[in-house]
Image (spheres, rainbow, N blue to C red):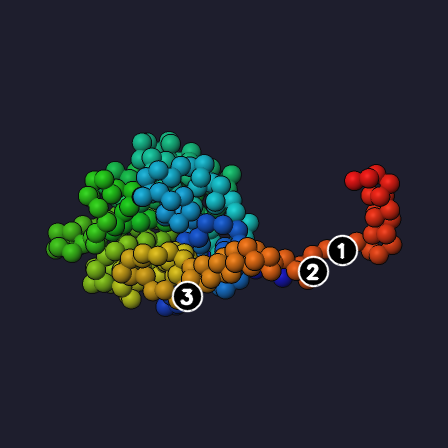
Amino acid sequence: MKTERVIPETLLDMKERGEPIVMISTYDYITAKIADECGVDVILVGDSLAGPILGLPNTLGVTMDEMLHHTRGVARGANRAMVVGDMPFMSYQTCSEEAVKNAGRFVKEAGAHAVKVEGSGAMVERIRAIVEAGIPVMGHIGLTPQWVLEIGGYRVAGKSLEAAKKLVEDALLLEKVGVFCLVLECVPWQVAKAITERLRIPTIGCGAGPYCDGQVLVLHDLIGVTEKVPKFVKKYAEVGKEISRALREFRQETKEKKFPTMEHSYSMPAEEEEKFISWLKTRHL
């Protein structure tokens, strides 16, 4: 049976119905397949793969080729969920032409259904150009990790009156230029609530409180693979500890020659084994 794909209109309908949107960030075929089968609505192939996948200190070193590689795998695993490719640092900041070109690569080469772009200000024109090229864009304001050098670290955005006002104005502007959805990262719940109530498009909270139209977490964080997680993350499992237990047990049984047993071994048919032994004898091997 063909499963109906989640599209931007689906998310708009969900907001109107008051049905929360579920989004996760993951980076490979098998976890995307599991997420899709569990009913996740949107899968973001985030540049957050910098940490759990590439071991980088921040997202600035992630390349377009790396993002495309991981997006391809996720796209193959998602039959219903919308797949969003996260445009990495310097893939859109330089000019609108470059932004459109790289957004197009996510769609043509990797099978994404949309892209995510961080920021507002000068990025508004980049977003407008991508939207006008026919590629859906998910916006992202609040804490924007690609601007970490400018903002001086990872911190909550919108805590002062002036900062909160700017977030509201940025959100309204991004809706006007055509983003279909807006991620609010590390924003006080009061500000996120005000934005959500004023936008026709849905908001997705990432450390932005309970009043957004949906929520997103990194899969590795919520299942307990990542050791250190932000305050806004709830761990729903401790998979990392189970992986460690399994690997230690595998190591011990291998060292003690308890694994593999015949249960985990293949065997020749008896008549073929007899012929094989006879052949070995003739060869004096």
Circles 1 and 2, Cβ within 8 Å, touching? The answer is yes
Q: Which residue is mark 1?
A: 267
Circles 2 and 3, Cβ within 8 Å, touching? The answer is no
* Three-letter residue code for mark 3: Ala
Image x and y of residue 246, in percent: 50, 60
Which residue occupies 46% across, 49% down?
27
* Three-letter residue code for mark 1: Ser
Relative side of 222 to 243, left or right: left
- Measure the C-alpha gap from mark 1 to mark 3: 39 Å
Residue 217 sits above or below residue 137 on the image: below
Badge 3 local density, few (<14 within 10 Å), some, or many (20+)? Answer: some
Q: Is residue 198 visible?
A: no
Q: Which residue is mark 3?
A: 237
Image x and y of residue 82, in percent: 47, 54
Which residue occupies 25% across, 38% down?
122
Q: Quadrant of the C terminus?
A: top right
- Measure the C-alpha gap from mark 2 to mark 3: 34 Å
Q: Which residue is mark 2?
A: 262
Image x and y of residue 237, in percent: 41, 66
Badge 1 local density, few (<14 within 10 Å), some, or many (20+)? Answer: few
Dot 3: what SS?
loop
Badge 2 local density, few (<14 within 10 Å), some, or many (20+)? Answer: few
Dot 2: what SS?
helix
First reached walking from the N terminus: tag 1 or tag 2: 2
